[in-house]
Image (spheres, rainbow, N blue to C red):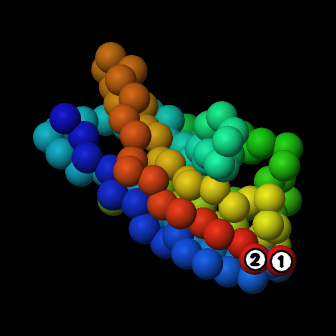
Amino acid sequence: QVQLVESGGGLVQGGGSLRLSCAASGSRFSINVMGWYRQAPGKQRELVATITSGGSTNYADSVKGRFTISRDNAKNTVYLQMNSLKPEDTAVYYCNVEVLPYGIHYWGQGTQVTVSS
Protein backbone atom coordinates (compact mmCIF):
# COMPACT_ATOMS: atom_id res chain seq x y z
CA GLN A 1 0.00 0.00 0.00
CA VAL A 2 1.21 3.50 -0.88
CA GLN A 3 0.14 6.67 0.86
CA LEU A 4 0.34 10.07 -0.81
CA VAL A 5 0.45 13.32 1.12
CA GLU A 6 -0.03 16.55 -0.79
CA SER A 7 0.76 20.07 0.32
CA GLY A 8 1.18 23.56 -1.04
CA GLY A 9 -2.30 24.57 -2.19
CA GLY A 10 -3.94 27.82 -1.23
CA LEU A 11 -5.34 31.14 -2.37
CA VAL A 12 -3.32 33.34 -4.69
CA GLN A 13 -3.96 36.35 -6.87
CA GLY A 14 -3.90 36.04 -10.64
CA GLY A 15 -0.34 36.16 -11.93
CA GLY A 16 1.01 34.66 -8.74
CA SER A 17 2.78 31.39 -8.06
CA LEU A 18 2.31 28.28 -5.98
CA ARG A 19 4.32 25.09 -5.53
CA LEU A 20 2.60 21.79 -4.85
CA SER A 21 4.35 18.79 -3.32
CA CYS A 22 3.31 15.17 -3.08
CA ALA A 23 5.28 12.65 -1.03
CA ALA A 24 4.75 8.91 -1.37
CA SER A 25 5.34 6.52 1.49
CA GLY A 26 4.55 2.94 2.46
CA SER A 27 6.05 -0.48 2.10
CA ARG A 28 8.81 -1.12 -0.39
CA PHE A 29 7.79 0.05 -3.85
CA SER A 30 9.10 1.43 -7.11
CA ILE A 31 7.36 4.34 -8.77
CA ASN A 32 7.18 4.73 -12.51
CA VAL A 33 5.09 7.71 -13.58
CA MET A 34 4.14 10.53 -11.21
CA GLY A 35 1.64 13.17 -12.15
CA TRP A 36 -0.78 15.91 -11.27
CA TYR A 37 -4.44 16.11 -12.24
CA ARG A 38 -7.06 18.70 -11.41
CA GLN A 39 -10.81 18.92 -11.13
CA ALA A 40 -12.73 22.16 -11.24
CA PRO A 41 -16.32 22.40 -9.98
CA GLY A 42 -18.73 20.82 -12.44
CA LYS A 43 -15.92 19.52 -14.65
CA GLN A 44 -14.19 16.21 -15.17
CA ARG A 45 -10.77 15.50 -13.71
CA GLU A 46 -8.08 16.37 -16.24
CA LEU A 47 -4.39 15.77 -16.69
CA VAL A 48 -2.10 18.64 -15.77
CA ALA A 49 1.37 17.11 -16.08
CA THR A 50 3.24 13.83 -15.74
CA ILE A 51 6.87 12.84 -15.31
CA THR A 52 8.46 9.43 -15.78
CA SER A 53 11.16 7.90 -13.61
CA GLY A 54 13.62 8.91 -16.31
CA GLY A 55 12.51 12.54 -16.25
CA SER A 56 10.41 12.74 -19.40
CA THR A 57 7.58 15.20 -18.98
CA ASN A 58 4.17 15.77 -20.51
CA TYR A 59 1.92 18.81 -20.03
CA ALA A 60 -1.61 19.83 -20.83
CA ASP A 61 -1.63 22.55 -23.48
CA SER A 62 -3.36 24.92 -21.07
CA VAL A 63 -0.38 24.92 -18.66
CA LYS A 64 2.59 24.66 -21.01
CA GLY A 65 5.12 27.39 -20.37
CA ARG A 66 3.59 28.24 -16.97
CA PHE A 67 3.79 25.02 -14.94
CA THR A 68 6.83 22.82 -14.32
CA ILE A 69 6.71 19.28 -12.96
CA SER A 70 9.74 17.73 -11.28
CA ARG A 71 10.51 14.83 -8.98
CA ASP A 72 13.02 13.72 -6.39
CA ASN A 73 13.33 9.96 -6.77
CA ALA A 74 15.30 9.59 -3.54
CA LYS A 75 12.42 11.17 -1.62
CA ASN A 76 9.61 9.67 -3.73
CA THR A 77 8.28 13.18 -4.11
CA VAL A 78 6.80 15.03 -7.07
CA TYR A 79 6.47 18.79 -7.34
CA LEU A 80 4.40 21.15 -9.46
CA GLN A 81 5.66 24.71 -9.77
CA MET A 82 2.81 26.86 -10.99
CA ASN A 83 3.59 30.36 -12.27
CA SER A 84 1.47 33.03 -13.94
CA LEU A 85 -1.62 31.51 -12.39
CA LYS A 86 -5.01 32.33 -13.89
CA PRO A 87 -8.50 32.14 -12.38
CA GLU A 88 -9.22 29.20 -14.70
CA ASP A 89 -6.50 27.23 -12.89
CA THR A 90 -8.77 27.14 -9.85
CA ALA A 91 -9.41 23.48 -8.99
CA VAL A 92 -8.63 20.68 -6.61
CA TYR A 93 -5.25 19.28 -7.61
CA TYR A 94 -4.60 15.57 -7.18
CA CYS A 95 -1.33 13.70 -7.16
CA ASN A 96 -1.20 10.32 -8.92
CA VAL A 97 1.56 7.72 -9.00
CA GLU A 98 1.96 4.48 -10.89
CA VAL A 99 3.62 1.79 -8.77
CA LEU A 100 5.56 -1.10 -10.24
CA PRO A 101 5.60 -3.95 -10.96
CA TYR A 102 1.83 -4.16 -11.48
CA GLY A 103 1.12 -0.64 -12.63
CA ILE A 104 -1.27 0.14 -9.80
CA HIS A 105 -2.28 3.81 -9.54
CA TYR A 106 -2.70 5.66 -6.28
CA TRP A 107 -4.31 9.05 -5.71
CA GLY A 108 -3.64 11.75 -3.17
CA GLN A 109 -6.41 13.36 -1.14
CA GLY A 110 -6.35 16.54 -3.22
CA THR A 111 -5.31 20.09 -2.42
CA GLN A 112 -7.36 23.18 -3.27
CA VAL A 113 -5.86 25.86 -5.47
CA THR A 114 -7.86 29.06 -5.80
CA VAL A 115 -6.78 31.90 -8.07
CA SER A 116 -8.53 35.22 -7.66
CA SER A 117 -8.93 37.71 -10.48
What's the residue type where badge 2 is placed? Ser
Q: Residues within 10 Å of mark 1 (few under 14, many from 20)?
A: few
**How many tags in the picture?**
2
Q: Residue at x 67, y 80 (%)?
A: 12
Is residue 75 rendered to the left or right of residue 13?
A: left
Spot occupied by residue 85 in the image (x, y as percentages of width and height): 78, 70
Determine the image quadrant of residue 115: bottom right
SS under mark 2: strand
Residue sticking out furthest to the left: 27
Q: Residue at x 62, y 37 (%)?
A: 45
Q: Quadrant of the N terminus?
A: top left
Q: Is residue 26 above or below residue 105?
A: below
Spot occupied by residue 25 in the image (x, y as percentages of width and height): 24, 50
Q: Residue at x 59, y 61 (%)?
A: 80
- The label shown at residue 116 is 2
- The label shown at residue 117 is 1
Q: Quadrant of the C terminus?
A: bottom right
Q: Are marks 1 and 2 in contact (CB under 8 Å)?
A: yes
